Image (cartoon, rainbow, N blue to C red):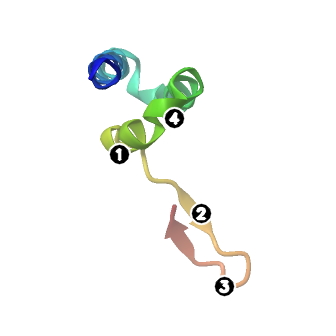
Amino acid sequence: MADYEENEQQMDCALDLMRRLPPQSVEENLVTLLEVLPELTEDLLAAVDQPLKVRQDAHSGKEYLV
C-alpha cells in the first residue's frame, strides 16, 4: 500500500512540475522526468499532452502527423 501512495504522490508532484514548466519545452521536460521516475513512464505518457509534429514522406512528399 505504501508503494501505491508513494507513486501517487510522485505522480502528483511530476504533473504539478510539468504545469509550472514552460510549455515550449514539454518534450525535453517529459524526457527528463521519465529518466528520473522510470516507474511512472506509462502514467506520465498518458497524462501529459505532447505536441504533434509534421513529417514529410520521402517517397510521396506528402505531409503526415507524428
The reply to whether discs 3 and 1 touch (Cβ–Cβ < 8 Å) is no
Residue 65 is left or right of residue 20, and the answer is right
Point out the residue furthest to the front here.
1
Question: Could you say whether the residue bearing mark 4 is in a helix, strand or loop?
Answer: helix
Camera-near label (3 vs 1) is 1
- Name which residue lies at 63% across and 69% down: 56
**x then y, percent, for residue 41:** 47, 37
Decide: few, some or many residues near mark 2? Use Cα within 10 Å; few <14, some 14-19, many ≥20: few
Q: In the image, is residue 48 above or below residue 2?
A: below
Q: CA distance from mark 4 to mark 3?
A: 28 Å
Decide: few, some or many residues near mark 3? Use Cα within 10 Å; few <14, some 14-19, many ≥20: few
Number of numbered discs visible in the structure rendering: 4
The reply to whether discs 2 and 3 touch (Cβ–Cβ < 8 Å) is no
The first of marks 1 and 2 along the sequence is: 1
**x then y, percent, for residue 40:** 43, 32
Q: Which quarter of the picture shows residue 43? A: top left
- Name which residue lies at 37% across and 20% down: 14
**x then y, percent, for residue 53:** 51, 54
**x then y, percent, for residue 58:** 73, 75
Decide: few, some or many residues near mark 4? Use Cα within 10 Å; few <14, some 14-19, many ≥20: some
Q: CA distance from mark 4 to mark 1?
A: 13 Å
Amino acid at dot 2: Arg
The reply to whether discs 4 and 2 touch (Cβ–Cβ < 8 Å) is no
Amino acid at dot 4: Glu
Question: Could you say whether the residue bearing mark 1 is in a helix, strand or loop?
Answer: helix
The circle on residue 27 is 4
- According to the picture, the residue beneath numbered tag 3 turns out to be 60
Q: CA distance from mark 4 to mark 2?
A: 17 Å
Q: CA distance from mark 1 to mark 2?
A: 23 Å
